[in-house]
Image (tube, grey):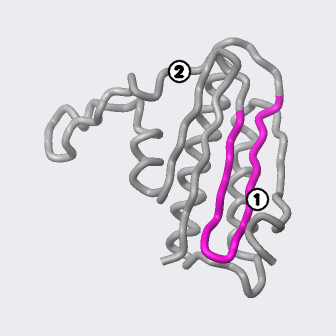
C-alpha cells in the first residue's frame, strides 16, 4: 500500500480545551497502533503528540478569540516512513513570519517569555512544519519521519 492510498483518520472537535486530550490520544494511538507499518519510535510519538497538541491548542485559542464555533479538523495519516497531521481551524489567521524569535534559552528574558512557543516548538520537533494562514483560518501541517 503506498502512502497515497493509506486512509486518513479525521476528527472534528468543538473549539474547546476539553477536547485537546482526545486529539493527543487519537494521534498517539494512530502512530502507535499501525500494525507492522508503525514508522515511529516511542520518543518520536511523544514529539508528535506534543506538536499536535500545540497546533490544536493554538486553533482552539484562535477560534475562541473571535467566537468562532466551527469545528477544528485534525487529520492524521500514517505512512510507511512518516506520520502527517493537519490541524485546520477557522480563526482569524496570523502572519507566521511575524512570530518573534524566542530569546536564547540561557538568557533571563527566556524565563519571562510565556507565549509564542508553539510555532518554535513545532519547527524544532517536527521534521516538517508548514503553516498556511489567512483571514478564513489556519492549516498547520506537521510531519514526523522515522529515524
How crowded pointer 1 is (Cα within 10 Å; few <14, some 14-19, many 20+) is rated as some
The numbered mark, 2 or 1, whose residue comes first in the sequence reads: 1
Q: Is 84 covered by the magenta stretch?
A: yes
Residue 60 at x, y percent in the picture: 67, 30
Q: Residue furthest top?
A: 66
Instruction: Report the front residue among 104 and 78.
Output: 78
Question: What residue do we see at 62% from left, 77% from top?
Answer: 39
Question: What residue do we see at 59% from left, 26% from top?
Answer: 133
Which part of the image, by quadrant, shows the N terminus? bottom right
Instruction: Report the front residue among 129 and 119.
Output: 129
Which residue is labeled 2 in the image? Answer: 94
Helix, strand or loop at label 1? It is helix
Residue 13 at x, y percent in the picture: 82, 39
Question: What residue do we see at 28% from left, 36% from top?
Answer: 102
Residue 83 at x, y percent in the picture: 64, 64
Which span is picked out in magenta? Answer: 71-88
In terms of image quadrants, where is residue 5? bottom right
From the viewer's perspective, is 1 left or right of 25?
right
Q: Is residue 118 above or below residue 27?
A: above
From the viewer's perspective, is 103 left or right of 59?
left
Q: Which mark is residue 26?
A: 1
Amino acid at each position: 500500500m503506498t502512502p497515497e492510498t493509506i486512509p486518513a483518520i479525521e476528527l472534528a472537535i468543538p473549539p474547546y480545551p476539553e477536547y485537546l486530550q482526545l486529539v493527543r490520544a487519537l494521534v498517539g494511538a494512530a502512530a502507535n497502533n499501525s500494525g507492522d507499518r508503525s514508522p515511529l519510535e516511542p520518543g518520536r510519538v511523544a514529539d508528535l503528540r506534543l506538536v499536535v497538541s500545540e497546533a490544536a491548542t493554538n486553533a482552539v485559542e484562535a477560534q475562541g478569540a473571535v467566537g468562532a464555533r466551527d469545528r477544528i479538523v485534525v487529520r492524521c495519516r500514517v505512512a510507511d516512513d512518516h506520520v502527517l497531521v493537519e490541524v485546520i481551524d477557522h480563526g482569524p489567521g496570523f502572519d507566521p513570519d511575524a512570530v518573534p524569535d524566542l530569546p536564547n534559552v540561557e538568557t533571563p528574558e527566556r524565563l519571562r517569555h510565556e507565549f509564542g512557543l508553539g510555532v518554535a516548538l513545532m519547527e524544532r520537533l517536527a521534521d516538517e512544519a508548514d503553516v498556511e494562514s489567512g483571514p478564513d483560518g489556519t492549516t498547520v501541517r506537521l510531519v514526523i519521519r522515522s529515524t
